[in-house]
Image (cartoon, rainbow, N blue to C red):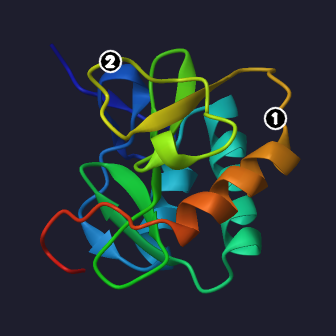
């Protein structure tokens, strides 16, 4: 089975998720967004811009082939990831958000998410409110304090 390669030469993993090396800062996040296939790139650009507008001092990194966003050193409040038919925006402490984001299962712990499909209207006012709330909450740490 050959690997799928996106239009800019980046390997796309299952669901079309770009394979981007671990890195800190805006550069790796922008490389991830630039490698998002098709309509998903526009969603990534909008999410990144909305997060930066809502949390001006946001910290960024790429881990596990996904961009992560944090408000404080060592913890992260949100991430997004490409899947076959949608982009999933996850809030790590989403169970504390009001109203609750629609995604979640009994096994998802504190995490909640929203799935964004092609052509779907994005309620940026609601997303900005969730982003603001999530950034104010204790975040999730993957232990490397980056």
Label 1 sits on a secondary structure element that is loop
Asked whether, in this view, residue 13 is left or right of residue 71, the answer is left
Look at 77% across and 72% down and name the residue there: 53
How far apart are the alpha carbons under marks 2 and 1?
A: 26 Å
Q: Quadrant of residue 4?
A: top left
Please state which of residues 50 and 106 is positioned toward the viewer in this rendering. 106
Asked whether the viewer can see residue 48, the reply is no
Please state which of residues 110 and 144 is positioned toward the viewer in this rendering. 110
Asked whether, in this view, residue 117 is left or right of residue 15, the answer is right
Q: On screen, 93 above or below 14?
A: below
Label 2 sits on residue:
106
Q: On screen, 82 above or below 18?
A: above
Residue 83 point in image, percent of width and height: 44, 24
Residue 133 point in image, percent of width and height: 63, 60
Please state which of residues 90 and 42 is positioned toward the viewer in this rendering. 90
Image quadrant containing the N terminus: top left
Label 2 sits on a secondary structure element that is loop
Look at 29% across and 31% down and name the residue there: 13
Look at 24% across and 26% down and name the residue there: 3
Label 1 sits on residue:
122
Residue 124 point in image, percent of width and height: 83, 47
Asked whether, in this view, residue 70 is left or right of residue 13, the answer is right
């Amino acid at each position: 089975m050959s690997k799928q390669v996106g239009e800019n030469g980046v390997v796309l993993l299952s669901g079309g998720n770009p394979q981007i090396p671990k890195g800190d800062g805006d550069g790796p996040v922008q490389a991830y967004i630039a490698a998002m296939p098709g309509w998903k790139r526009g969603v990534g650009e909008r999410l990144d811009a909305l997060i930066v507008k809502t949390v001006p001092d946001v910290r960024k990194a790429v881990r596990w082939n996904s961009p992560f966003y944090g408000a404080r050193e060592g913890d992260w409040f949100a991430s997004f990831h490409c899947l076959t038919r949608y982009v999933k925006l996850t809030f790590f402490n989403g169970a504390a958000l009001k109203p609750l984001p629609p995604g979640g299962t009994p096994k998802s712990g504190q995490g909640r998410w929203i799935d964004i499909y092609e052509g779907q209207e994005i309620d940026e006012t609601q997303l900005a409110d969730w982003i603001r709330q999530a950034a104010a909450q204790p975040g999730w740490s993957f232990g490397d304090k980056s």
